[in-house]
């Protein structure tokens, strides 16, 4: 019988909420270093049995990711795709919940809210490294504005990564993402806490942009627009 996603989600949220209330950073650090995982079989309100897995992953400097996965797939067990809930703990004990990947009618909301730009790389593309084990790669012409691109007096600044004409983007170092949207047309919009908006349109001949992380998540705007999406290892969808 196929597991009930609503019941599985409730189990994941309950376990994560309970864990984040009692977890200590030093204990999580040991768990992550040793690769420890905790399994538990749970009977849901629908009477079905669910397997709950708790484990810890590195997230960034002095931060750890607490992960609860329900019906995690194992090599020797053909279970349903896992339903995952996560939280991030800093070394000072503060716990936050990262944004979730979400699909809407005309766009995807990328899970980068709250991540900080910790490095800006320039080659034949512009790369923004984020502290949540993710990065944004810009290969085609992009636009930076202070405020929305459509606002009067926006004064857009053009970036041309293929010619290394990206100096204005260096100001994004240290900025925090407050919104990141991949439109199904292929456009990308990233908004930072500085008020700066980064917009990239599809390119007719080249991949305009791509994002990598966390984990196996990958978005690509292929030549001509649209989206190519990998949400898990070996699992691809078209946007």
Image: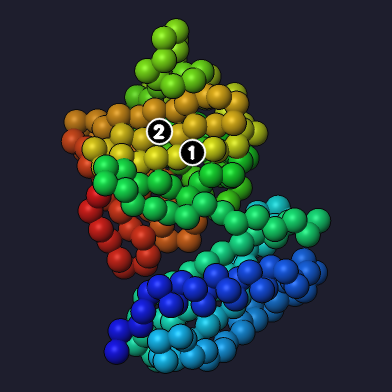
* Labels 2 and 1: the sequence-earlier one: 1
The structure residue drawn at horizontal position 26% and vertical position 46%, both measured from the top left corner, is: 105
Residue at 70% x, 52% y is: 61
Q: Is residue 160 above or below residue 228?
A: above
Residue 117 appears left or right of 202: right
Mark 2 Cα shell of 10 Å, populated few (<14), some (14-19), many (≥20): some
Q: Is mark 1 on a helix, strand or loop?
A: strand
Cα–Cα span, label 2 and label 1: 8 Å
The residue drawn where x is 56% and y is 64% is 86
Left or right, residue 50 beside residue 195: left
From what the image shows, is residue 195 above or below residue 24? above
Residue 220 in view of the camera: no
Q: Residue 189 carries which label?
A: 2
Q: Nearer the viewer, mark 2 or mark 1?
A: 1
Location of the N terminus by quadrant is bottom left
x and y, in percent, of residue 221 in the image = 29, 41
**In this picture, residue 224 sits left or right of residue 125:** left
Q: Could you say where residue 70 lies in the image, as x and y percent from the top left? A: 47, 78
Q: State the residue in front, 192 or 60.
A: 192
Helix, strand or loop at label 2? It is strand
Q: Where is residue 214 in the image (x, y as percent from the top left)?
A: 49, 56
Write the residue at 58% across / 44% down.
115
> Residue 110 in the image: x percent, y percent?
43, 47
Asked whether the residues under the numbered discs 2 and 1 touch, taking CB atoms below 8 Å apart as contact, a structural biologist would say yes
> Which of 111/207 is in front?
111
Residue beneath label 1, please?
179
Q: Which mark is residue 131?
A: none
Quadrant in which residue 199 is drawn:
top left
């Amino acid at each position: 019988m196929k597991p009930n996603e609503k019941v599985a989600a409730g189990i994941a949220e309950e376990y994560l909420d309970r864990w984040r209330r009692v977890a200590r950073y030093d204990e999580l650090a040991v768990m992550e270093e040793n690769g420890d995982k905790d399994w538990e079989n749970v009977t849901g309100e629908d009477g079905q049995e669910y397997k709950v897995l708790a484990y810890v992953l590195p997230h960034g400097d002095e931060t750890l990711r607490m992960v609860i996965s329900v019906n995690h797939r194992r090599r020797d067990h053909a279970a349903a795709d896992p339903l995952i809930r996560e939280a991030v703990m800093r070394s000072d004990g503060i716990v936050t919940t990262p944004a979730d990947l979400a699909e809407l009618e005309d766009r995807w909301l990328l899970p980068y809210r709250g991540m900080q730009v910790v490095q800006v790389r320039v080659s034949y593309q512009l790369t923004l490294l984020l502290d949540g084990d993710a990065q944004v790669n810009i290969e085609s012409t992009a636009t930076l504005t202070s405020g929305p691109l459509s606002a009067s007096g926006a004064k857009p600044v053009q970036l041309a990564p293929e010619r290394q004409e990206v100096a204005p983007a260096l100001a994004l170092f240290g900025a925090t993402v407050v919104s990141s949207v991949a439109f199904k047309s292929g456009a990308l919009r990233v908004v930072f806490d500085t008020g700066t908006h980064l917009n990239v349109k599809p390119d007719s001949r080249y991949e305009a942009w791509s994002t990598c992380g966390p984990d196996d998540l990958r978005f690509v705007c292929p030549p001509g627009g649209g989206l190519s999406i990998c949400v898990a290892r070996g699992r691809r969808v078209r946007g």
